[in-house]
Amino acid sequence: MYRAVALWALRAGIDPEDAHRLAPLARAARIEFRNGAVLLNGEDVSAEIRKPEVTEAASKVSASPGVRQAMREEQRRIGMENSVVMEGRDIGTVVFPDAQVKIYLDADAGERARRRAVETGASAAAIAAEIARRDHRDRSRREAPLTQAPDAEYIDSTNLSPEQVEEAILKIIRARISN
């Protein structure tokens, strides 16, 4: 959702750190999820929101209190209307602090950079620097900093395959739901 707002801001020529102009943009954004696609105001932006410049802008946009409030309200609305699995840097701490199951999925920064490089074809070194900046910005922001919720289960996926991560998550869900 933050990536979609960042994309719209970039398209509109709005500085990703201009909180005053970003808040109304975020409130006006119609962000939908259909069949694995992300729609922004009716347009499929699934590929565009994964571009490096949008990734960088999304971290800056997400530091805006007005954007965070708009996205939090929308995420809660979605969660109230549907059975959902949500991921995000403050889903378990701020958006849904009373969620039945919370998982803090992590990986070594070098491995995260390697994975993104494979995915995008970009330089792992450049991606590692971007990840370090983003992590620092997200952990040190005033509004909803990146932290692990005290009741979240921690999974380090550094040395796990996608299938192993899925199994670890399902094991946690089964244990929480059956109890």
Image (tube, rainbow, N blue to C red):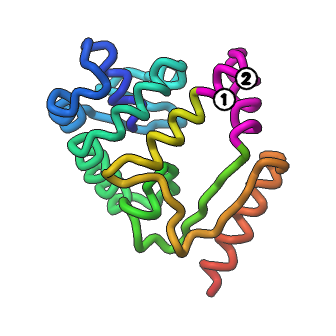
Please tell me whether the stretch drawn in magenta is mainly helix, strand or loop: helix
Looking at the image, is 108 positioned above or below residue 100?
above
Residue 142 screen position, x and y as percent: 32, 51
Examine the structure image and report whether residue 114 is included in the region drawn in magenta. Answer: yes
- Compute the Cα span from label 1 to label 2: 6 Å
Looking at the image, is 25 positioned above or below residue 150?
above
Which amino acid, by three-letter code, is at mark 1?
A: Ala
- 53 left or right of 160? left
Q: Quadrant of residue 116?
A: top right
Looking at the image, is 94 positioned above or below residue 47?
below
Q: Which stretch is magenta?
A: 109-129
Examine the structure image and report whether residue 175 is included in the region drawn in magenta. Answer: no
Identify the image quadrant of the N terminus: top left
Are the residues flagged by discs 1 and 2 in contact, CB closer than 8 Å? yes
Which amino acid, by three-letter code, is at mark 2?
A: Ala
Of 124 and 75, the residue lying toward us: 124
Of 52 and 164, the residue lying toward us: 52
- Residue in the image at 27% along x and 20% along y: 15
- 165 left or right of 33? right
Looking at the image, is 153 positioned above or below residue 91?
below
Q: Which residue is mark 1?
A: 128
In the picture, the disc for residue 124 is 2
Q: Secondary structure at mark 1?
A: helix
Residue 7 screen position, x and y as percent: 37, 22
- Residue in the image at 34% along x and 59% along y: 81
The local crowd at label 1, few if under 14, some if 14 to 19, many if 20 or more residues have their Cα within 10 Å, is some
Q: Secondary structure at mark 2?
A: helix
Number of disc labels: 2
Q: Quadrant of residue 50?
A: top right
- Residue in the image at 27% along x and 39% along y: 64
The local crowd at label 2, few if under 14, some if 14 to 19, many if 20 or more residues have their Cα within 10 Å, is some
In the picture, the disc for residue 116 is none
